[in-house]
Each structure stands twice: as C-alpha cells, then as structure tokens.
Image: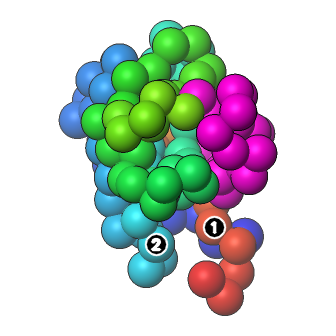
Amino acid sequence: MTSHPVVAIDDLPEGTNRAFDVGGRSVLVCRTKSGVFAVENMCSHALAHLEGGKMKGVHLFCPLHGVRFDMRTGEPSGTLTKKPIPVYPAQVDGGTIMVDLPDGS
C-alpha cells in the first residue's frame, strides 16, 4: 500500500464529499461525523459517479438511483446490486487526509 496526500481536512467540510484523482483512480473522499472515508467514485449498479451523493453515518447513497453503500466495507444494501464498491483506507495525518492505495495501481 502507498499512502497519498489528497486534501487538507479543513478544505473538506464535515458532511461533504469530493472526488480526486489519486494514483490514476477517481477516489471519492467523504467526511462525516463518523469519520473520513475513501471509496471508488463509481456505483457498481449503474456505473454512475458517486460524488455528490448524500451521506448518513457510514452510508453513502448513489445520486442516480439511491443505492446505499457502507463506506467502511463497500457493501451495498437493497436489491439493485449485490456488488460492493472498492474502499480504501483513509486517515488524517498532520491536517491532511491521506488515502492508501494498493501498490502498482
């Protein structure tokens, strides 16, 4: 795993998410009261971008059809898809949100 600096924590207010190009991938960084999360910015149901989707607790809702994903595991809820989305470890280090991606990605 390689850790990538993505955004200053102060530049991503609580309750928001934003997509970034991290190591050649579109990664959605989400900040909620429950913490900081990083997921692939692509819904496994309709291949729509997840950026801008509503968040509640540890769940992210696809803005297209409302599929709910657990941002900790990528697991979906409901009947639209059973395919999880990739999740990446995220943490705050010195005021910067860091995202870990597998090596060679």
Badge 1 element: strand
Badge 2 element: strand
Q: Which percent across, then down, holds residue 56?
A: 50, 13
Task: Note whether residue 17 is visible.
Answer: no
Res 101 label: 1
Res 25 label: 2
How crowded pointer 2 is (Cα within 10 Å; few <14, some 14-19, many 20+) is rated as few
Q: Is residue 13 left or right of residue 38?
A: left
Marks 2 and 1 in Cβ contact (< 8 Å): yes
User: In the rendered structure, which disc, 2 or 1, sits on the residue that comes first in sequence?
Assistant: 2
Tell me the residue at 36%/39% (across/down).
Answer: 64
Q: In which quarter of the image is the N terminus?
A: bottom right
Tell me the residue at 65%/52% (across/down).
Answer: 85
Q: What residue type is labelled 1?
A: Leu
Vertical placement of 104 versus 15: above or below? below
Q: Residue 59 or 45: which is nearer the viewer?
A: 45
Give the quadrant of residue 20. Answer: bottom left
Q: Give me the C-alpha separation between circle 2 and circle 1.
A: 9 Å
| Secondary structure that dominates the magenta span | loop
Q: Which percent across, then down, holds residue 63?
A: 35, 35
Q: Residue extending furthest bottom?
A: 104
Vertical placement of 47 versus 55: above or below? below
| Range of magenta residues | 68-90
Res 44 label: none
Q: Residue 85 or 38: which is nearer the viewer?
A: 85
Q: In which quarter of the image is the C terminus?
A: bottom right
Q: Which amino acid does label 2 sit on?
A: Arg
Tell me the residue at 57%/51% (across/down).
Answer: 45
Q: Is residue 16 left or right of residue 33?
A: left
Q: Is residue 92 left or right of residue 16?
A: right
72 is within the stretch colored magenta: yes
64 is within the stretch colored magenta: no
